[in-house]
Amino acid sequence: MSKFRLSSQTNYKAVVIGGSAGSFQSVTKLLATIPSDFELPILFCLHRLKHVRNGFVEALSIKSNKAIVEPLDKEPVRTNGVYLAPANYHMCVELGNTFSLATDGLVNNSRPSIDLTFETAAYVYRDKLIGILLSGANKDGAYGMKKIKEKNGLTIVQDPDESMINAMPTAALAATEIDMVLKVDEIIDFLMTLHKQMKR
Amino acid sequence: MKSNPISKSYLYTANDNAPDIEIADLRRLTQLIKEKYNYDFKDYAMSSFKRRIKRVIDLYKFKTVDKLITVLDTTPDFFEEFVSEITVNVTEMFRDPTFWRVLKDQILPNVLMNHDSISIWHAGCSSGEEVYSMAIVLKEMGVLDKAKLVATDIDSAIIDKAKRATFPIKNMELNSKNYGRFHDDATRTLDGYFREANGEAILNPDLTKNISFRRHDLVQGGIFSKFDLVLCRNVMIYFNQTLQNNVLNKLHDSLFKYGYLIIGSKESLIWCEIANKFIVVNNEEKVYKKIKD
Ligand SMILES: C[S@@+](CC[C@H](N)C(=O)[O-])C[C@H]1O[C@@H](n2cnc3c(N)ncnc32)[C@H](O)[C@@H]1O
């Protein structure tokens, strides 16, 4: 029996994952485990160096089972896709299921900002969205998690006790109702359980 | 009689508890703007347009879209400021340094091989960093005198700023760093092109003489000239697909046959109707060449 509350709903449309300082290892581990036929699009917004355009996708790809793409503006969000917000652009989702990129000011000192990816994805996917917030050093993502919850999406944060830098998960816990507080291995288990249920 | 002054808060703090702006509110807003001022924001990309509107509402403490609509309806003086606030003017000199290298090594030599003059349009030039970078490249190639540069933007305040050719010192570190990357030589800086006064970096006037700035709206405006090169970088990301198609038709019509179109490094023509009238010259740097009228 699964320890996760999945029974009520499995018809999710997308997963958004935010992370900052201290999340790289967790993300690599997750990508090494998620199988290539995992259906839901996964949208990563990870804080990164603003002026280093290349290299991050490559670093994340080494152990990944799936190809990772930095979407171009107006690129469709595809089933099965794994996306990474490009350096120095905010990555948003539009109605009609396409990406849009933007260069407006830093949000929470960040571009890409997790809040913007989460908020726009919540607007498009509503209760069919899973939001996961990993370790990080500021409060980016907390407002985004609140927006996901307002639309009745599923909210998960990495256990602050396990997070290398717990400011981000802690801020989210303070900002809104969080459905599950999990260790990284449990987050991966959860996604795998979801994967198996969707395959049935 | 003078109406209440519209005051802007000095520091922007987002109101995280404000209710979502509804699509219907945005429709009423864009309709009023279209009718009253003949600007059309209807087909701007929804997520960023909504965010910019929310920002204006928070900045001026309007609280609701309705209040903003009323203010725009009754205070024509506010409209230009409004346009300034909702456009995103973030820019850098030599943004995406590798693009400027391709420009210098391949594109400009190619154009100049067949012509003894060159005309270039910077559509959505913001505060001018891009067109001045172009002037520097042309100068270093010894062809600035053969060039005619036109730089346009919808935002008149930013055009005024661009004309001054003066930049905050704090931006110069990044500008210079980009320039060093462009030359693949970290020791090269922009110092020789600027002088410093009152905490600002002022561009040498000989670099500005072939540039004309003007206000021009890509959405409502017509075609005003033909160019060998059109740069429209990081502008159409603020448009939806419909508007991108519409604006791309105009950019296409503003290019001579075999002229070049350059868009932002994270944009693409793949999803656009006009794609078949261009070929890809450099996919990484988003350089296209017009091959069909
Ligand atoms: C992010 S800046 C890009 C500046 C520069 N091209 C670059 O890539 O660094 C976008 C500019 O597009 C302008 N813009 C937005 N809508 C426009 C329109 N309809 N017509 C002309 N310019 C527009 C904005 O005012 C803004 O200055």
Image (spheres, coloured by chain):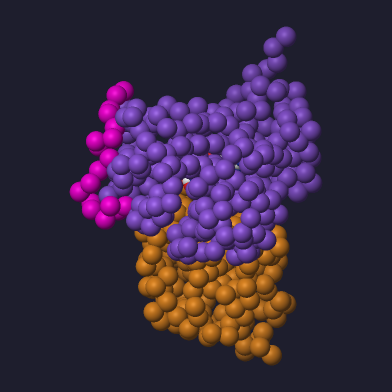
Chain colours: A orange, B purple
The location of residue A194, given as percent across then percent down, is 62, 82
The location of residue B47, given as percent across then percent down, is 64, 52
Q: Nearer the viewer, residue B247 or A32?
A: B247
- Vertical arrangement, residue A46 with respect to residue B3, above or below: below
The location of residue B159, given as percent across then percent down, is 51, 31
Q: Nearer the viewer, residue A72 or B139?
A: B139
Q: Hey, which quadrant is residue A144 in on the image?
A: bottom right
Residue B189: in magenta span: yes
Ligand 1 quadrant in view: top right
Q: Residue at x 38, y 64 (%)?
A: A54
Q: Hey, which quadrant is residue B134 in on the image?
A: top left
Would you say residue A173 is visible in this rendering?
no
Q: Residue at x 45, y 43 (%)?
A: B118
**In-image side of A122 versus B38 (left or right):** left
Q: Residue at x 67, y 39 (%)?
A: B222
Q: Hey, which quadrant is residue A56 in on the image?
A: bottom left
**In-image side of A168 versus A1 (left or right):** left
**In-image side of B90 versus A128 (left or right):** left
Quarter containing the C terminus of chain B: bottom right
- Vertical arrangement, residue A51 with respect to residue B279, above or below: above
Quarter containing the N terminus of chain B: top right
Q: Nearer the viewer, residue B13 or A158?
A: B13
The residue most toward the left is: B187
Residue B182: in magenta span: yes
Span highlighted in magenta in the image: B181-198
The residue most toward the top is: B1
